[in-house]
Image (spheres, rainbow, N blue to C red):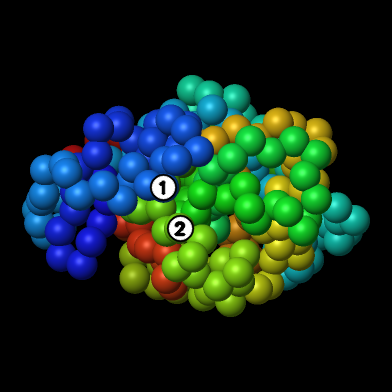
Amino acid sequence: MRLQKKHCVLLPYPDVGALIASGDDWWERAGADTGERLRLDDVSYAPLLVRPGKMVAVGPNHAVRVRELGCAIPAAPEFSVRNGGHAVVGADDDIRVPAEGRDVYWGVELGVVIGRRAREVTARAALGHVAGYTVVNDVAVRNGPEGTPPAAVATAVGPALVTADDVPIGARGLTMHCFVDGRVRQKASTSELLFDVATVIAHVSSAVTLLPGDLIRTGTPTGTGTGHEREMPTRSTTQVISVIRGIGELRNAVMRPGSQ
């Protein structure tokens, strides 16, 4: 689906990842104006990437978050990789957490969608491998006692892919907020990343081959908690809104068992 001012044009792909992976000329095909037109007010957004081939999680990648965790400032980006099959939800989808989850974790992140194969690329060349940017909120729960690592539940991605030419270089200088039931829980800027987008792509690609449609989560800022405070009240449904100015907004109801 390609967005215009007040309407969108449907494209013959199941998601944006499939469009990007269909060939280097995806940009031109995305600009085609031959599909069905729909009013934006009538559209409900599916996940931007239904099944990303790889999801790379970078972090901690904000200095204040590092201090919050009591860690040393990393010398290089630290990351983990999830290969396909992880649950991805859309910008307005509900996220249901398991009954045994003690605490619920969340956090707004800048998402980077890869547009061209990247292996051992330099930081100078890295941004040429970016298809665009999106908003990410990874929701996880801790099932065990304090200190037990949280387990992923679902990752909200979307609502749209904002191409690199529509944001500052490397998506720097964009404000980030996360609201929980109307309360500001996170506020930061993409300029505060310890390792910027180009550095992250160069470092990750030195160890992993990044392919079109892969997603990089660049790290969440402070405010997700340290275990001394519950991430989310124990009420049955909590509204989490993740916003990056110029990129988009996610509105996800995080629901516990028994909620409607």
Q: Is residue 152 above or below residue 252?
A: above
Write down the residue under mark 1.
Answer: 27
**Is disc 2 placed on a helix, strand or loop?**
strand
Q: Indicate the amino acid at tag 2.
A: Thr
Task: Please give left or right for residue 105 compared with residue 233 in the image.
Answer: right
Q: Indicate the amino acid at tag 1.
A: Trp
- The structure residue drawn at horizontal position 33% and vertical position 46%, both measured from the top left corner, is 30
Nearer the observer, 163 or 194: 163
Q: Is residue 90 above or below residue 133?
A: above
Q: Is residue 156 above or below residue 98?
A: below
Query: Can residue 74 be seen here?
Result: yes
Tell me the distance, in whole angstroms, between the alpha carbons under discs 2 and 1. Answer: 10 Å
Nearer the observer, 59 or 37: 37
- The structure residue drawn at horizontal position 81% and vertical position 59%, both measured from the top left corner, is 70
- The structure residue drawn at horizontal position 17% and vertical position 44%, both measured from the top left corner, is 34
Write down the residue under mark 2.
Answer: 163
On the image, the x and y values in percent for residue 184 come to 45, 73
Nearer the observer, 98 or 57: 57
